[in-house]
Amino acid sequence: MGYHLRRASAVFASDFAAATAGTGMRQVLFGILSVVATNPGISQSRVGAALGIQRANMVSLANELTERGLIERSVAPEDRRAFALVLTGAGESVLFDCLGRIGQHEDALLAGLSSAERHLLLRLLQRIHAQSSEVDL
Amino acid sequence: MGYHLRRASAVFASDFAAATAGTGMRQVLFGILSVVATNPGISQSRVGAALGIQRANMVSLANELTERGLIERSVAPEDRRAFALVLTGAGESVLFDCLGRIGQHEDALLAGLSSAERHLLLRLLQRIHAQSSEVDL
DNA sequence: TATTGTTATACTCTATAACTATA
DNA sequence: TATAGTTATAGAGTATAACAATA
C-alpha cells in the first residue's frame, strides 16, 4: 500500500508541477497559501502542524511567500512571540489561479475513475492521514 | 486529491522509516530490491523505468546496495553495456525481513479500513499510477 | 519551564548536462 | 545514431540542535 500511495502521489506531484509551470508555485507553498486562506491570522507553527512542516522549515517558506508579496506577517496581538499570517490580494489571485489549473489537470488524471470512485478514494485517503495529523483545519 | 495523496503517502513514508529502523533500508532501496527480486537479471535502466528513478540516480543507489552485499552486478551477456542485477542471499533476507516489518506496520495503519476498503483503495491507486508508468513489472 | 520564530547544518531525493563504451 | 552506465552538480525537501524573545 505504501508503494502504491508513493507512486500515485508522485504522479500527482509531477502533474502539479506541469499545471502550475510559470507561476513559481510548489506543492508546499500552495499548501501553506490554502491553510492561511481558510485560517486568516494563523501562526507559522500552526500552519506547520497542519501540513506536517517543521517550525524550522516554515521560516524560509514563509519568507519566500512574504518576499513575493503573497502573504503578510504581523505580530499576533495576543501572543507577541507569534506571527499572524494573512493572504494579500496577490496571494488570493495566485491561489485562485492555481486552484483552477490544478482542478483541470486533476480531472484529466482522474478521467478513468467514476465520480463515486473519486469520492470514495478521497474519503479513504482522508481517513488514513487524519489519524496521524496533529491539527486539522 | 493531490494534497490527500501527498499526506497519506507521507504517513506511510514515516511509518516505513519506523518499521525498518536499524536495517538501513529506505523506500527507494526497498523498491529496487523488490523489483530485482521479481525480475532477476534486470538492468539498472529497466529498474529505474519501473520505479520512476532516473538512470543517473540509479547509479549511487545500485552502488549502495552492491557495497552492502544485497545485490550483485554482472555484465549482461546479451548487451555488454548493461548490468544484470540479482539479489544475493543477504539481499533476500533483508527483503524478507522488511516485508514482514512493513506488513505489520501497514496493518496497524489500515486498522480503520475494512478488508474490502483496503482492496478497493489499492486498486484505485494502481489505476492512477498505471496510466503514467513507463514499464510495469 | 515551555513555546515561537530563527539560524545553521546535513542528508536524501530529484533533475540536468556531458562523458564513455557499447550497440 | 542511439542506449547503458557514469560523473558532477544544483535545487528542493526534510530533520536536528541550539539560540533569543516572549509566555
Image (spheres, coloured by chain):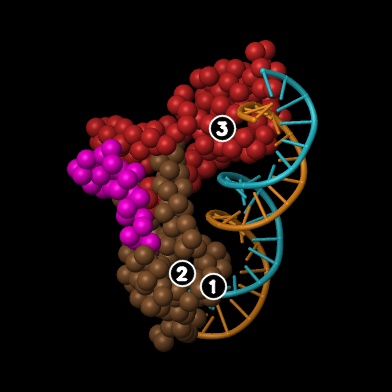
Chain colours: A red, B brown, C orange, D cyan
First-in-chain label (1 vs 2): 2
Dot 1 corresponds to which residue? B63
The kind of residue on which mark 2 rests is Ser
**Label 1 vs label 3: CA separation?**
36 Å
Residue C12 as seen in the image, left or right of residue B31: right
Examine the structure image and report whether residue B121 is included in the region drawn in magenta. Answer: yes
Dot 2 corresponds to which residue? B45
The kind of residue on which mark 1 rests is Asn
Q: Do labels 2 and 3 share a chain?
A: no
Examine the structure image and report whether residue B87 is included in the region drawn in magenta. Answer: no
Other residues around mark 1 within 10 Å, as few (<14) / some (14–19) / many (≥20): some
The chain identifier of the residue carrying mark 1 reads B
Which numbered dot is residue A48? 3
Residue drawn at point x = 45 percent, y = 74 percent: B70
The chain identifier of the residue carrying mark 2 reads B
**Label 1 vs label 2: CA separation?**
14 Å
Contact between labelled residues 3 and 2, with CB atoms less than 8 Å apart: no
Residue drawn at point x = 69 percent, y = 22 percent: A81
The chain identifier of the residue carrying mark 3 reads A
Residue drawn at point x = 36 percent, y = 55 percent: B102
Q: What element carries label 1?
A: helix
Quadrant for residue A88, please give it.
top right
Which numbered mark, 1 or 2, is in the foreground of this view?
A: 1
**Vertical order, A34 against B24 (above or below):** above
**Vertical order, A50 against A57 (above or below):** above
Magenta residue span: B98-125
Q: Do labels 1 and 2 share a chain?
A: yes
Residue A2 as seen in the image, left or right of residue A137: left
